[in-house]
Amino acid sequence: MATVPVMAPVQAPGLSGELYLYCQKRVRYCTAFADEIMTPAKTEDTSTPLRETRGLLFGLCGVAGFSATLPATRVAVAHLDPLLVGLGRSVVAGILAALLLWATRQPFPQRSQFKSLALAAACVIVGFPLLSSWAMVNLPAAHAAIMIGVIPLLTAAASALRSGERPSTGFWLTGLAGAALIIGYAFAGGAAHMQLADAALLGAALVVAVGYAEGGRLAQSLGGWQTICWALVLAAPFLVLPVLYAGLRHGLAAPLQSWLGFAYVAVVSQLLAFFLWYQGLALGGVARVSQVQLLQPFMTLGVAALLLGEPVTPSMLAFAVAVAAVVGIGRRMPIYTPEKHP
């Protein structure tokens, strides 16, 4: 994609020369940053330190965008129907994605890619938004941050199984330990049994892990931002009627903060954060860059505390650290390819 030209700085009337030059420089930086996101990364060399560093930075920015998803959803569903929030965000993002694909004249995916696109769309565009939106009606965002902390390990498992690899016994043991921690945290939350909302979050973590794995695999041939855009365009037409039904049945009356929360999950969580995330994976490699997702529960806890005033207790931090440690250990366990496994 060609870089958008930036006009040479000219002294603007009424503005300080230094301030004008500073603004021009910032525009150049932002233009270069956006151009790098939109340009598909070449995958033949992901081992250089510079590419790894850039990949980690893009991945970290993507995770930062994802980390506010649950708090923003919590704000949105306080006054809007969960079905409207969960599926409506994908309709809005799908419209933006269609405009972007049209403006950049992207070629249609190949027929062989539509099956993977459909699976990714079902998981990250329908399954996770719908399940998490429903769960956030009944659960604090800080609680939910711990519940989905096992996503990186589930993503690794889904990716390994999808490619025909065989995870080691140690990998599955750490996975079971992580699941036990999550379930234990749900019980420790004060209920004598897991709530349906907890089960919905676990289901959301599972489906989004499958979507990440399938989308990451497809992005190698289709491109990172193109993958999420085409998945949105594929899914959006099927979501319009349910969204209209939810809007007509429950109404659209809601305070500004609820609509701001909806706007965030539609534009950032469902679209822009995916641009950064997939570009980071392509630049730095999936195995290395995906590690930064371990920071997401802690970022979400911080956002929930700052924006929603939700308490972050020592037990929450302890469970978050324990889950991150188990996931980190699990990612180091060997996964055998078919030719290497006895």
Image: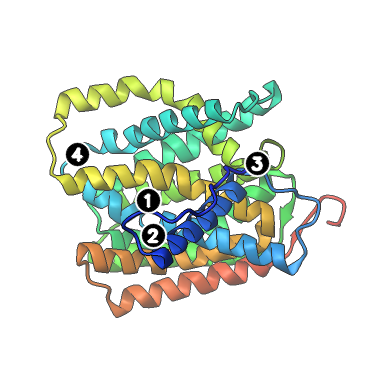
Q: Which residue is mark 3?
A: 219
Residue for badge 2: 147
Picture layout, residue 76 above or below residue 60:
above
Give the residue type at disc 2: Met
Residue that label 1 marks:
201
Sooner in the amino-acid sequence: mark 1 or mark 3: 1
SS at circle 1: helix
Which residue lies at the image location 72% right of the left edge and 37% below the top edge?
A: 221
From the viewer's perspective, tell me whether residue 292 is left or right of residue 111: left
Label 1 Cα crowd, 10 Å radius (few <14 / some 14-19 / many 20+): many
Q: Examine the rendering and report whether any part of residue 154 can be seen.
A: yes
Which numbered disc covers residue 307?
Answer: none
Residues at badges 4 and 1 in contact (C-beta under 8 Å)?
Answer: no
Location of residue 246 (image quadrant): top left
Between disc 1 and disc 3, the foreground one is 3
Circle 4 residue = 80
On the image, the x and y values in percent for residue 337 come to 80, 53
Q: Look at label 3 and name its amino acid.
A: Ala
Q: Residues within 10 Å of mark 2 (few under 14, many from 20)?
A: many
Q: Is residue 227 above or below residue 51?
A: above
Q: Position of residue 315 (x, y in %)?
A: 32, 77
